[in-house]
Image (cartoon, helix red, strand yellow):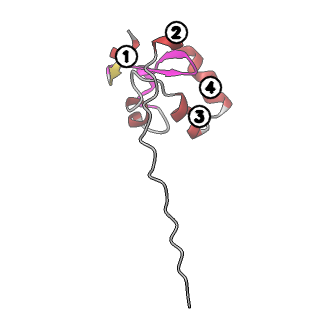
Amino acid sequence: MWAKHNHKKDCWIIVNKKVYDVTPILDDHPGGDDALLSAAGKDATADFEDVGHSDSAVEIMEKYFVGEVDATTLPSEVKKNPAPPVQSIFWILI
């Protein structure tokens, strides 16, 4: 249900298993609307925490709270291909 709210006229994000309708604050968001739109309809918890929002920002979010999401309905994290092992090269000087 929440995943279809992913555009400028209907923008929802998930942060810490809570759904927020951030549509009304797109134009006023200090990071710009792109920051919110790129997370629209998705779990934005990691992005939200990486930025380090203030306590007042967290309080402001509460007025945009829609409800809680069942974590089992979230898509599992895409596992990235592991980097190939680094091969050490030893030079022997004679």
Type of residue at label 1? Answer: Ala
**SS state under label 1:** helix
Residue bearing mark 3: 49
Image location of residue 71, percent across then percent down: 53, 14
Residue 11 occupies quadrant: top left
32 and 86: which one is in front?
86
If you read the primary sequence from the N terminus, does the residue marked by circle 3 or circle 1 appear first?
A: 1
Residue bearing mark 2: 70
Type of residue at label 4? Answer: Val
Residue bearing mark 4: 58
11 and 50: which one is in front?
50
If you read the primary sequence from the N terminus, does the residue marked by circle 4 or circle 3 appear first?
A: 3
Residues under labels 3 and 1: Cα distance? 20 Å
Residues under labels 2 and 1: Cα distance? 13 Å
Q: Is residue 39 visible?
A: yes
Residues under labels 4 and 3: Cα distance? 11 Å
Question: Which of the two discs, 2 and 1, sits closer to the camera?
Answer: 2
**SS state under label 2:** loop
Image location of residue 65, percent across then percent down: 53, 13
**SS state under label 3:** helix
Residue bearing mark 1: 3
If you read the primary sequence from the N terminus, does the residue marked by circle 4 or circle 1 appear first?
A: 1
Question: Which of the two discs, 4 and 1, sits closer to the camera?
Answer: 1
Question: Which of the two discs, 4 and 3, sits closer to the camera?
Answer: 3
Residue 24 included in the magenta stretch of the image: yes
Range drawn in magenta: 9-28
Residues under labels 3 and 2: Cα distance? 20 Å
